[in-house]
Image (tube, grey):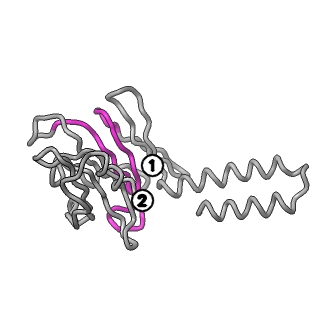
Amino acid sequence: MKLETIIDFLIFFFTFVPMRSMLVISIVATILVSCATETENGGFSLEKKNDTLYNLVLETDSSRDVWELRFPVYRFCTGDMDGDSIVDAVVGVEKTTRFDPVVRRRVFMFRNIGGKVRPLWMGSRLGQPVVDFRVVQVDGETRLRSVEEEKNGKFLVAEYRWSSFGVKFIRYICRDFEFDNSMEILNDK
């Protein structure tokens, strides 16, 4: 449910319902906002237990499933990354991998399969070392937009889309930019 629909609903009731019914209206509004939030994030949330332990939580009407992340998390986003019309969770973690023993920022994607959190992609890297990312909509398609550090110490902003197993590079938005400029572009929806 879209936030605009909820607001229209509340305006209608606050305009036409007597004041003695305001308590009922506020309860209904709380429920509607909760539903809107769950719809937007697909039921996914992130719980911080301590600096190096997080839980990725998936809550549905009838279940609650938890995927433990035993490393620092720097970013949490949601979006339909694989195009199946079900919201996925995209989590930025800081860890080593089997093929890269250096602690770096990684991008992990998780799916909702029957109310259970399941890995979609546990990426060891994108094109360059990841600094940060967002999930964005471009021309009706969900994409991963990242800031990555180039070998010369400057930064680039790139976009990726899901491609059967992993993400596929689409385009550079900019290259050889200063950090602050790259972050501005990343945050520009």
Kindly identify which numbered label has been placed on residue 87.
Answer: 2
- Residue projecting furthest to the top: 50
Looking at the image, residue 1 sits to the left or right of residue 169; the answer is right
Residue nearer the viewer, 186 or 116: 186
Kindly identify which numbered label has been placed on residue 125.
Answer: none
Residue drawn at x 31%, y 46% is 180
**Magenta span: chief secondary structure:** strand
Q: Quadrant of the C terminus?
A: bottom left
Give yes or no for residue 140 being in the magenta stretch: no
Q: Which residue is mark 1?
A: 44
Q: Which residues are magenta?
A: 68-96
> How far apart, in angstroms, are the residues tagged by discs 2 and 1?
8 Å
Question: Is disc 1 surrounded by few (<14), some (14 to 19) or many (20+) residues within 10 Å?
Answer: many
Residue 65: horizontal and vertical position, in percent? Answer: 43, 44
Residue 120: horizontal and vertical position, in percent? Answer: 28, 55
Q: Given contact means CB atoms under 8 Å apart, are the residues at marks 2 and 1 in contact?
A: yes
Give the quarter of the image for residue 72: top left
Amino acid type, mark 2: Val
